[in-house]
Image (tube, rainbow, N blue to C red):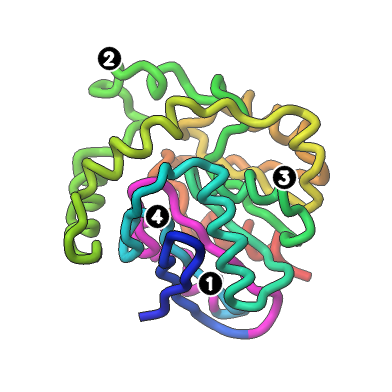
């Protein structure tokens, strides 16, 4: 299996397709490449080289004795690009994967040409109240379903390296990163030079008003709101999402 030694982490990654500007795919928290991108990956890789990666403690990438901060996760992604000899890429990050890429895009802006920031927020107040209030999770129609959580556990158990502590341990370890998220200042966001597509579902974690703020603060940005899409369902609306992505990524 293809693993890249990047500092303390050995990152699992896989490649699909060939040609064009390479596209880096980064799944969201608790998701694998398949769970997040299985419906859009065939279409995306039919026209370009795609490098899909699983971050620390996700899927086939083992956890290590290190806090999964956004700074660490972003450094891992740039380290993977260095390992593969890729100077500049397009990138698509979903949720936590998008946050890690946004951190990278503010610190290493010259490494990214086009950036799809999918279901990501830039400030702590970017989510709907039923996502930030645990007492409302049980009744929220935006939260992942029981079937979604079951699939996350099943895939983690199937793919995680031997000795892994389990998905619940990974979730707990990520909580300081998620709960302590402070976002980026206007000045930090202004460093992003990649042409950026902000993409959310119309029933996502992220509010439409917050997505509009992202459109305002991220240079050279545009916005796509996908109808009939929840947070976990966004990348499975391939019939709507793929044409938008292809139009944005086209040269």
> Disc 3 marks which residue?
106
- Is residue 66 placed above or below 41 in the rendered structure? above
**Residue receiving disc 4:** 56
Give the mark toward the camera: 1 or 2: 1
Q: Can residue 226 be seen in this view?
A: no
- Of residues 244 and 220, the one drawn nearer to the viewer in this rendering: 220
The answer to whether the residues at label 3 and label 1 have Cβ atoms under 8 Å apart is no
Rounded to the nearest angstrom, the CA distance separating label 1 from label 4 is 16 Å
Q: Which of these two is toward me, 251 or 72?
A: 72
Instruction: Between label 4 and label 2, give the one nearer the viewer.
Output: 4
- Specify whether 157 is left or right of 48: left
Q: Name the residue under label 2.
A: 135
Give x and y (percent) for residue 96. 48, 44
Q: How far apart are marks 4 and 3 (CA)?
A: 21 Å
Query: Badge 1: how crowded within 10 Å, few (<14), some, or many (20+)?
Result: many
Q: How many numbered tags mark residues here?
A: 4
Instruction: Give me the residue at 63% from left, 71% from top.
Output: 82
Q: Tell me the CA gap for discs 3 and 1.
A: 21 Å
> Circle 1 sits on which residue?
51
């Amino acid at each position: 299996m293809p693993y890249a030694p990047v500092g303390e982490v050995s990152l699992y990654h896989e490649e699909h397709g060939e040609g064009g500007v390479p596209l880096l795919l980064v799944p969201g928290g608790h998701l694998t490449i398949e769970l997040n991108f299985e419906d859009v990956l065939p279409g995306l890789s039919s026209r370009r080289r795609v490098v899909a990666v699983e971050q620390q403690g996700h899927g086939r990438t083992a956890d290590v004795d290190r806090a999964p901060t956004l700074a660490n996760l972003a450094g891992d992604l740039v380290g993977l690009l260095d390992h593969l000899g890729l100077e500049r890429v397009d990138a698509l990050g979903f949720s936590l994967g998008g946050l890690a890429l946004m951190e990278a895009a503010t610190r290493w802006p010259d490494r990214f040409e086009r950036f799809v920031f999918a279901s990501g927020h830039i400030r702590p107040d970017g989510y709907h109240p039923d996502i930030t209030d645990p007492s409302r999770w049980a009744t929220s129609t935006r939260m992942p379903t029981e079937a979604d959580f079951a699939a996350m556990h099943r895939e983690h158990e199937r793919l995680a390296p031997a000795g892994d502590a389990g998905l619940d341990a990974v979730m707990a370890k990520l909580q300081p990163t998620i709960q302590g998220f402070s976002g980026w200042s206007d000045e930090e966001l202004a460093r992003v030079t990649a042409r950026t597509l902000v993409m959310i579902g119309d029933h996502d974690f992220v509010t439409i008003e917050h997505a509009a703020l992202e459109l305002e603060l991220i240079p050279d940005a545009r916005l796509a709101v996908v109808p009939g899409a929840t947070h976990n369902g966004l990348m499975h609306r391939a019939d709507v999402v793929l044409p938008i992505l292809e139009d944005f990524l086209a040269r």
